[in-house]
Image: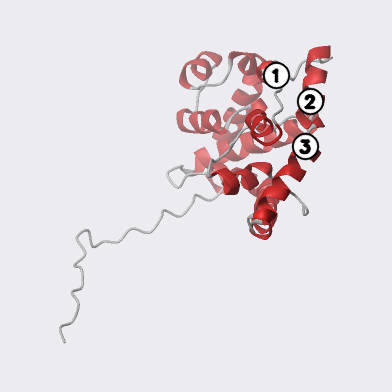
């Protein structure tokens, strides 16, 4: 993934403000004002409303003009090459993060404190979520967020009631996927230990709790 220009990275160089929103960027750079009323509407519904479609069009309509304005300002300050390099580095890192091999997907959410059975539950849920996200063309977090995955792995719920009370899963997602998740948990619990994934190695901790600071040698 190359030739990516990130306006937020660029604007952070120009303004010192991290993660400036599109609405503010247009107002500051082009003196244009757009309505963000529909940003929190239900974008999973089909068909989209006329207002949502117009919002989506407006959300990209002004990007070329915004880029030209930012490019001019960056070049005037001698910053363009630095921003371009940062954008390519960010794009490369993002690509690597999004293209983790399926077999290792669960490791991105793993914790060294998980036992082998919990690792099996995590692997099962991560694999299921990835397959469902691809099949339905949804972001993984629209199906189940990482926090909820970790809560399931920690609590290992046995029923819909426990799943609802011990996790932060959205109620609509519980209704859609609760039984599937419980099946994944049961299957992982029934796996023989020999088939469990390996646990993560704990981070190294020095046994010396009170290290002595070395003093500078006197002349």
Nearest to the observer: residue 76 or residue 94: 76
Tell me the tag on residue 157: none
User: In the image, is residue 185 above or below residue 1?
Assistant: above
Residue 124, position in %: x, y? 63, 36
Q: In the figure, is residue 202 to the left or right of 195?
A: left
Q: On the image, numbered disc 3 is attached to which residue?
A: 63
Q: CA distance from mark 1 to mark 2?
A: 9 Å
On the image, the x and y values in percent for residue 48 come to 81, 15
Mark 1–mark 2 CB contact (< 8 Å) = yes
Which residue is nearer to you in this view: 40 or 7?
Answer: 7
In-image side of 40 versus 114 (left or right) = right
Q: Looking at this rendering, what residue extends furthest in the left direction?
A: 218
Q: Provide the residue designation for mark 2.
A: 58
Residue drawn 58% across the image and 49% down it: 13
Q: Which residue is mark 1?
A: 35
Q: Is residue 207 above or below residue 172?
A: below
Disc 3, SS: helix
Q: Nearer the viewer, residue 120 or 200?
A: 200
């Amino acid at each position: 993934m190359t030739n990516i220009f990130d306006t937020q990275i660029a604007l952070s160089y120009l303004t010192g403000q991290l993660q400036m929103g599109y609405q503010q960027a247009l107002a500051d750079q082009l003196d244009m004002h757009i309505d963000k009323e529909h940003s929190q509407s239900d974008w999973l519904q089909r068909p989209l409303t006329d207002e949502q479609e117009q919002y989506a069009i407006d959300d990209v309509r002004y990007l070329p003009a915004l880029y030209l304005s930012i490019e001019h300002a960056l070049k005037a300050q001698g910053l363009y090459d630095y921003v371009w390099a940062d954008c390519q580095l960010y794009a490369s890192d993002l690509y690597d993060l999004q293209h983790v091999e399926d077999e290792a997907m669960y490791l991105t959410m793993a914790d060294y404190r998980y036992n082998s059975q919990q690792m099996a539950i995590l692997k099962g849920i991560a694999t299921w979520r990835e397959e469902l996200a691809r099949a339905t063309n949804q972001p993984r977090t629209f199906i189940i967020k990482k926090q909820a995955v970790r809560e399931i792995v920690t609590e290992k719920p046995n029923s819909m009631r426990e799943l609802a009370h011990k996790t932060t899963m959205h109620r609509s997602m519980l209704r859609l996927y609760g039984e599937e998740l419980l099946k994944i948990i049961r299957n992982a619990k029934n796996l023989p230990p020999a088939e469990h994934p390996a646990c993560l190695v704990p981070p190294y901790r020095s046994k010396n709790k009170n290290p002595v600071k070395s003093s500078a040698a006197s002349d």
